[in-house]
Amino acid sequence: MTPAGGRAGSTFLVALLALALGACGPYAEVAQKLDVTARVEGDTWIAAAETEVRILLVGKPGSDGSAPFAFTSLQFPISAGTSAVTLQGTWTEAGSDGSATLRVEREYTLPDERSTSLFSRRGAWRADVGRTIALTVTRDGSRLVLAGNGSLDGTYLAFGGALARLGTATSRDAACAFQVANLGIRSSEVRIIGFGGPGMTQYQRPENYVGTVAGSLRVSLSGFTDNTTTISYSAFEDLGGARVDGSQITNANSSGDGRMSGVLTFVLQPLAPDGTAIAPITGTLDFGGADNPADAVQISDGAATGGFYVVSIEGGGSARVSPETPPSPSVSECLALP
Amino acid sequence: MSGAPLALALALGALGGAAPGGARAAETAGPKAGKPSGIHHGSRHALALGPHATTFFSEGGSQYTFFSGSVGYLGSLGARGPFVHVFALVPLQARQDGSVYATGDYYRRRAGGDLLLGWQWRWSVHPDLEAEAGPGLHGTLVYLPGKTGYRDFSALPLGLGGGAVLRWRRGDHGFSQPITVGAYCAAAFDLYDPLRSDDLAHGFTFSTGLLLGLGVAR
């Protein structure tokens, strides 16, 4: 084969390989818009049940009485997190008996596919559902109690107020800061269509996703057999009061093995009982092991299985959090959730 | 694709100059109805143009349908022998579960291919009209990288199919071979998609169109 023919052949093979790698997993939706998130400007609430953390954002009602809402359920049997679900739609409260109707327009699912072969994984996906959920809502000070649907029920605390329970000085405080800042990171990943599966090759062309509250992220992927996935956060807020900036970088080969790098800065903004902002908690979350590259988060078969998230609070404590062990302390313990 | 060597062999056969002599000899022999005769020997080559449709169901129950324009090559060898139908596709309309989309609105590139590779039999349906048909292995590729903000789509349903060709000799010649016009059609039942983790439950592909070709040896 001539050199030119060799280049053409190589290009063809690379194109075939790219197509093959990019096409694995179930069929995509036809003509699917990647980011359809509508901003929710309102209140953020948080609840916990065993290994699950529930986050509810309810916007300000419009003239018709309905408000945009977003609900995310995150599973944290391990600090890296496993499965997650997000609902988006409208929230309508009618009358004074606390009855509310949630019209769910979109449902995002990030399944736990650690036991599924890498190229058979679906990754995060979205369905337009159009279903209704009936709830009973009770407000009690800084608490919001939902009843009537097992997936959403719980006693929620105002997120800003709960952040005021975080400390800054100790290693435990730093571990808590990680667990809380990680909520926004995980909830963003649920909405990145294809996240966790071979469909991520979609992002050979970078795409943007907005934060539910503010900011945005940009996800991009380079390489074919050895991939580098970069998620760059810019003033990103999926929970009101928890902002992240910076890049999370994952290098992995075609077997899903590799390591992470990149540093995110986080700002957690606690609120006093009267709603005024108090001193924020700022810090960094280093995926690359900080000063010790051997501590970088290790990726095996597409999942974080080793190394440490190195978290440092500015002017405070620091901690190394293993991705593969249960959160210690948990979000519920950190924020003293009911 | 595996059909490329066969197509190349067929094309080389067409330009090799061996067929015209045999064709002229066959012209003097005349047709012998009811059994294969020399009039159907030789290679056949044609360019084809027509619509293409593929529809398939995912394991999750969604139905996907793609209507495409297609241009391709039809080739075959011998009165009984191998054939290949290979097409380039331009998907024009996509459907999913009843929703209809103009692909140009959502995808920055619209590409695809269709291959039917099998074994054919030829016979005369009229003194100037030759038919050819046979079963084969089938594959359709749909490749639709999304515009900014939209998700990519791709599929490669594979299965079994059959194709048929009707050729009418007009009397003109090109490359020392008779020029023909005609029509083709093909259908396939698809049952496996290696690029989609076999998310394919089953599917069907249909194509038809007109052809302009060389090599009816009469």
Image (tube, grey):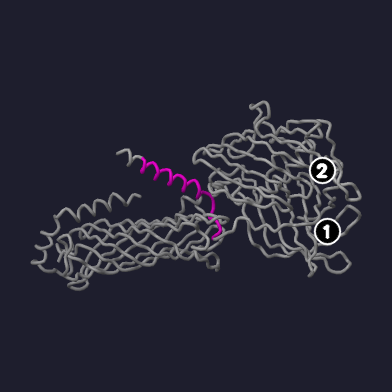
Give coordinates of residue A63: x percent, y percent.
Answer: 79, 69
Give the residue at mark 1. A147
Residue drawn at the location 53% of the way across and 37% of the way down = A253
- Span shown in magenta: A7-30
Please tell me in which quadrant of the rendered image residue B208 appears. Answer: bottom left
* Residue A257 to residue B19: above or below: above
Left or right of B55? Residue A91 is right
Nearer the observer: mark 2 or 1; the answer is 2
Left or right of A210? Residue B167 is left
Residue in the foreground of this view, choosing between A299 and B33: A299
* Residue A35 to residue A245: above or below: below
* Residue A17 to residue B99: above or below: above
Residue in the foreground of this view, choosing between A232 and B14: A232
Q: Mark 1 Cα within 10 Å, few/some/many (few <14, many 20+)?
A: some
Spatial CA span between label 2 and label 1: 20 Å
Q: Mark 2 Cα within 10 Å, few/some/many (few <14, many 20+)?
A: many
Secondary structure under the numbered disc 2 in the rendered image: helix
Please tell me in which quadrant of the rendered image residue A68 appears. Answer: bottom right
The amino acid beneath tag 2 is Ser
Give the residue at mark 2. A332
